[in-house]
Image: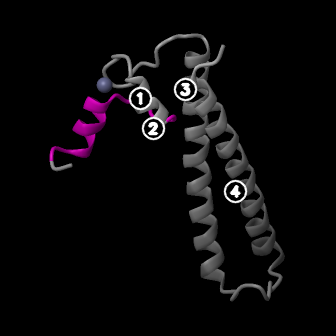
Amino acid sequence: MESDLVGELRGEMTRVAALVEDLRQELAGIMLAAAGDAPDDEHDVEGSSIGFERARVTALLAATEQRQAALSRALTAAANGVEVRCATCGQAIDPERLSALPGTTTCVACAGRRAGPSR
Ligand SMILES: [Zn+2]
């Protein structure tokens, strides 16, 4: 029997995997455009904008892959009935927080500390 959390994590995994795939293709397209120097009339081609796009997509892809890895850990833990522990303090992360933010690696207290008291 699956808990709601496992189902939600699976759904999120599917979305994130699709996003990673999209970003990889987008990045491959940018690399191709940059290498071929072929004007793509769909875009206003400037050398600097290709470099900017490449940096943006690369950063986004890295962040998304990180999220995918975190989700995978959370899913494994949830599927095995193991608590997901905070990467900072080692306390179990509240399941409600996990279902709201499936890829999170920190508990509410640590996330709050990191964000600062003004939040
Ligand atoms: Zn913590």
Q: Nearer the viewer, residue 33 or 96?
A: 96
Q: Secondary structure at mark 2?
A: helix
At a point 45% along the width and 38% down the height, the residue shown is: 100
Please state if 67 lies on the left or on the right of 113 as rendered. Answer: right
Nearest to N terminus: mark 4 or mark 2: 4
Question: Which residue: 37% across, 23% down?
Answer: 94
Kindly identify the amino acid type of the residue bearing the numbered disc 4.
Answer: Leu
Marking on residue 5 = 3
Q: Give the mark, 2 or 3, whose residue is nearer the N terminus.
A: 3
- The residue segment tinted magenta is 102-117
Which quarter of the rendered picture does the N terminus lie within?
Answer: top right
Q: Earlier in the sequence, mark 1 or mark 3?
A: 3
Separation of marks 2 and 1 at Cα, in angstroms: 6 Å
- Give the image location of residue 115, x and y in percent: 26, 45
Q: Which residue is mark 2?
A: 100
Residue at 55 percent of width and 40 percent of height: 67
Quarter of the image holding residue 24?
bottom right
| Residue 88 at x, y percent in the picture | 34, 25
Give the side of residue 94 with respect to residue 42, left or right: left
Sequence-wise, the earlier of marks 3 and 4 is 3
Q: Amino acid at mark 2?
A: Ala
**The furthest residue to the top:** 81
